[in-house]
Image (cartoon, grey):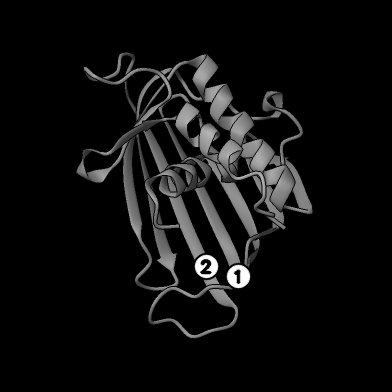
Amino acid sequence: MHTPSALLAAVALAIAAPVSAAAQSTADLPARKPGHWEVRVVTEKPAGGPTLDTQICIDAATDRELMEFALQLSKDACPKLDMKRAGVGLTIDFQCKVGPVSTNARATMSGDFQSTYTIRVEGTSDGVPLPGTPKGPQDMLIVQTGRWTAATCPAGMKPGDFTLPGGMKFNIKQAKQFQKMLPNIQIR
């Protein structure tokens, strides 16, 4: 996944998939407050994994569109999905396979999704190891945090826009187009 289009789809999936993995519809998911969000995705395990800081501009329609996109990808890649509510939080147990990578994990979601949220994904992953890591199953821990910063987005951002480190910007519609360009690639 070295092309910009692949990166766009990967970022959209990383930000939305843990939230949408086990939902039957977007009605099952907590809606984020419209406006500008700062989102950080930290790979704590395996050691040396990446950290991704991004800015997202959403309104109700693009938040739902992002969740629908990730929900469709999750349905295609995850034969086991089990979601349970725990008070205001959610716990999702899932098994997924994307290309050569298999994942067996639990996502725990907390927060009000109006000002902050945290998604903690913990489990094992097997397939293509990160450089410098041994082959075989690897423990994984990915923590995503989101923080709402304003009702309006910065100049130059419109609903559905993501801004990545280095200023790279894309819209959820671009990630969805990438998915359509790959009809011959099997996710399972």
Is residue 20 visible from the viewing direction of this image?
Answer: no
Q: Name the residue under label 1.
A: 124
Compared to residue 71, the image places residue 97 above or below, namely: below
**Which residue shows up at 58% across the image and 46% down it?**
18
Q: Which mark is residue 140?
A: 2
Q: Is 183 left or right of 128, judged from the image as shown?
A: right
Which is more N-terminal, label 2 or label 1?
Answer: 1
Residue 95's place in the image compared with 118, above or below, is: below
Determine which quarter of the picture holds residue 122: bottom right
Q: Which residue is drawn at 35% across and 61% down?
A: 50
- Specify few, some or many for label 2: CA neighbours under 10 Å numbering under 14, 14-19, or 20 or more: many
Amino acid type of the residue that numbered disc 2 sits on in the rendered structure? Met
Q: In the image, residue 44 lies at what x, y percent?
A: 41, 65
Q: Residue at x 50, y 25 (%)?
A: 32
Does the residue at mark 1 contact the one at mark 2 (Cβ under 8 Å)? yes
Please give left or right for residue 181 compared with residue 50 in the image: right
Identify the element where label 2 is drawn: strand
Question: Hey, which quadrant is residue 158 in on the image?
Answer: top left
| Up/down of 185 relative to 25, above or below | below
120 sits left or right of 25 in the view:
left
Question: Could you tell me how many numbered marks the image carries?
Answer: 2
Q: Give x and y (percent) for residue 49.
A: 38, 66
**Mark 1 Cα-neighbour bin, 10 Å: few <14, some 14–19, many ≥20:** some
Above or below, 10 relative to 101: above
The residue at 70%/29% (across/down) is: 28
Taking 90 as reference, is 32 left or right? left
The disc label shown at residue 181, or none: none
| Residue type of the residue flagged with mark 1 | Thr
User: Residue 153 location, x and y as percent?
Assistant: 29, 18
CA gap between label 1 and label 2 equals: 5 Å
